[in-house]
Image (tube, rainbow, N blue to C red):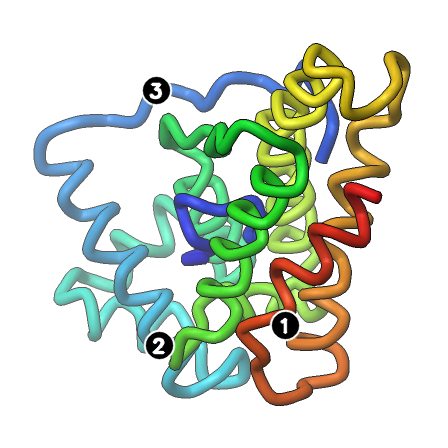
Amino acid sequence: MAPSEEAIGISGSNSTAPAPARRPGGRSARVRERVLDAVRAQLVEHGYDELTVDAVAARAGVHRTTVYRRWRDVGGLLADVLDAAGDDGWRPRDTGDLAGDLAALNQEVYAALTERPSVTAALIAASFRSAEAADALRRFWDDRYARCEAVVQRAVRRGETPAGTDARALLVAATAPLYHELVLLRTPPDPRLPGRAARAAAG
């Protein structure tokens, strides 16, 4: 969740996050898609230590010089996987109330973190080994949290939360328990967790 392309979890509140750069089309786009698919598959199947440019090139069926020329190294490959995950039109669902919106958001995070294998969890782990991946992951989360500010803005308009509420703080309060439980503590998945965390944050 790659980071899930439909979740905050691999889903920040920087509302001035830059728009994604235009990506090349045609053959270049097809090569990029094959290479990034290969990065994700290699990472979840074999881990960071076996994620090499040569392994990715072989898996994608492209020449290693193509990968070196465009991505340089593993950090560049991971960063592009994460940047690609943000190239979408995803927006948080409007369920009609704050707790429902946060629960819907958490359900997407939960799905991304509990799928097997979890690309999202693998990319989070890789970000601790690669500075480029860590920067790209931060950009992804900044973008997702910025999009999710709409959840808090709707709640303010409905009178569910006061004007001036810190949107990012509220969103982090809702989503953080999922990352803490499922990624850090590695507790068994509990389908009640997304709703419970959402209700606690919504107050």
Pinpoint residue 194: horizontal percent, then vertical percent: 61, 61
Quickly name the residue at label 2: 42
Amino acid type shown at disc 3: Arg
Q: In which image quadrant can residue 70 be found?
A: top left
- Nearest the eye: 50 or 64: 50
Judge whether 111 appears above or below 70 on screen: below
Which residue lies under the disc numbered 3? 22
Depth check, mark 1 against mark 3: the one in front is 1
Q: Which residue is mark 1?
A: 125
Circle 1: residue type: Ala
Q: Are marks 1 and 3 in contact (CB under 8 Å)?
A: no
- Which residue does the image show at 58% across and 26% down from the upper left? 147
Estimate how packed mark 2 is, as few (under 14), some (14 to 19) or many (20 or more) residues with alpha carbons within 10 Å: some
- Badge 3 crowding class, 10 Å Cα cut-off, few under 14, some 14 to 19, many 20 or more, is few
Quadrant for the C terminus in the image: top right
Of mark 1 and mark 3, the one earlier in the sequence is 3
Label 3: element kind: loop
Quadrant containing the N terminus in the rendered view: bottom left
Residue 89 lies, in percent from the top left, at: 37, 26
**What's the residue at 48%, 75% (across, down)?**
114
Q: Position of residue 202 (x, y in %)?
A: 78, 42
Q: Residue at x 16, y 27 (%)?
A: 25
